[in-house]
């Protein structure tokens, strides 16, 4: 029985990605669907991997996306970036280019102004890592 | 830091209330603090650690940046344009340098 139980434990991540997510959400559940993270399935060069986040939100004064946290669970440091939006953003969309040391999951978590959270994750296969010299 | 050049693309005009796309790029090596030199010593981290965009003094978009953002950090985002005015863009370097750029936009 013990062996069966241990299989359901999450695989230990290489860095503190989960701790950073927990600090961001305060441990709240993050739903799926509202947030879309776009990233390539395969990145030939881990030094510059394009990513884009889009959150379905009216971006009005009383209902908008406050922030989107980006972490990478296989980098030496999990933190990548945090985008901060305002109703003046008009749309909750942002894109940038990031470094990935190896094949791993990129995770985005959005914080809404009403205190709810949304999450999305994509696995990116990296051919040449982006952290060494 | 020398040779840091911000570049920003903002449309010259928009309709009142229109949501426009802004693209920004700043030339910067974004030394991650993970690399070693030929002698095996860690090269100290030096990155752009934050970026913000304001319109007529009101915050529009900002970003906290970690070493995992690629060199020559690029950001694309949206902005609602309620009236004619000026976008101001600010990047902050680990060494304390602040790089700024402004762009005017005309509401038709």
Image: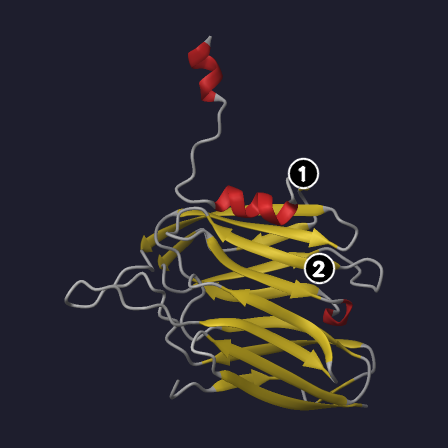
Q: Mark 1: give few (<14), some (14-19) or many (20+) Cα within 10 Å.
A: few
Give the residue displayed 42% in from the left and 44% down from the top: A15
The answer to whether residue B41 is left or right of residue B23 is left
Question: Same chain for marks 1 and 2?
Answer: yes
- Total residue callouts: 2
Give the residue displayed 31% in from the left and 61% down from the top: B34
The answer to whether residue A125 is left or right of residue A85 is left
Residue that sits furthest to the left in the current view: B39
Q: What is the chain identity of the residue bearing mark 2?
A: A
Residue A118 vs A11, above or below: the answer is: below
Give the residue displayed 76% in from the left and 72% down from the top: A88
At which x and y percent is residue B33?
A: 34, 64
Name the quarter where the C terminus of chain A is drawn: bottom left
At which x and y percent is residue B42?
A: 26, 64
Residue bearing mark 1: A29
Residue B5 vs A6, above or below: the answer is: below
Q: How is the image coloured?
A: secondary structure
Q: Secondary structure at mark 2?
A: strand
**Residue sitting nearer the eye, B42 or A109:** B42
Label drawn at residue A66: 2
Residue B102: which quarter of the image?
Answer: bottom right
Circles 1 and 2, Cβ within 8 Å, touching? The answer is: no
Q: What is the chain identity of the residue bearing mark 1?
A: A
At which x and y percent is residue B91?
A: 53, 78
Upstream in sequence: badge 1 or badge 2: 1
Label drawn at residue B106: none
């Amino acid at each position: 029985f013990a062996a069966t139980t241990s299989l359901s434990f999450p695989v230990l991540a290489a860095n503190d990605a989960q701790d950073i997510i927990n600090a961001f959400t305060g441990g709240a559940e993050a739903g799926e669907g509202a947030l879309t993270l776009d990233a390539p399935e395969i990145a030939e060069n881990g030094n510059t991997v394009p990513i884009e986040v889009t959150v379905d939100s009216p971006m009005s004064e009383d209902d908008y996306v406050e922030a989107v946290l980006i972490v990478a669970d296989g980098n030496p440091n999990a933190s990548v970036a945090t985008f901060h939006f305002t109703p003046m953003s008009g749309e909750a969309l942002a894109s940038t280019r990031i470094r990935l040391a190896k094949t791993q999951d990129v995770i985005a978590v959005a914080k809404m102004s009403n205190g709810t959270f949304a999450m999305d994750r994509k696995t990116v296969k990296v051919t040449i890592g982006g952290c060494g010299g | 830091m020398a040779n840091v050049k911000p570049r920003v693309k903002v449309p010259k005009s928009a309709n009142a209330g229109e949501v426009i796309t802004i693209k920004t790029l700043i030339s910067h090596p974004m030394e991650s603090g993970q690399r070693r030199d030929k002698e095996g010593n860690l090269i100290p981290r030096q990155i752009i650690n934050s970026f913000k965009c304001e319109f007529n003094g009101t915050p529009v978009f900002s970003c906290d940046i970690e070493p995992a953002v690629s060199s020559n950090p690029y950001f694309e985002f949206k902005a609602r344009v309620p009236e004619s005015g000026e976008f101001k863009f600010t990047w902050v370097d680990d060494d304390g340098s602040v790089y700024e750029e402004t762009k005017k936009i005309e509401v038709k």
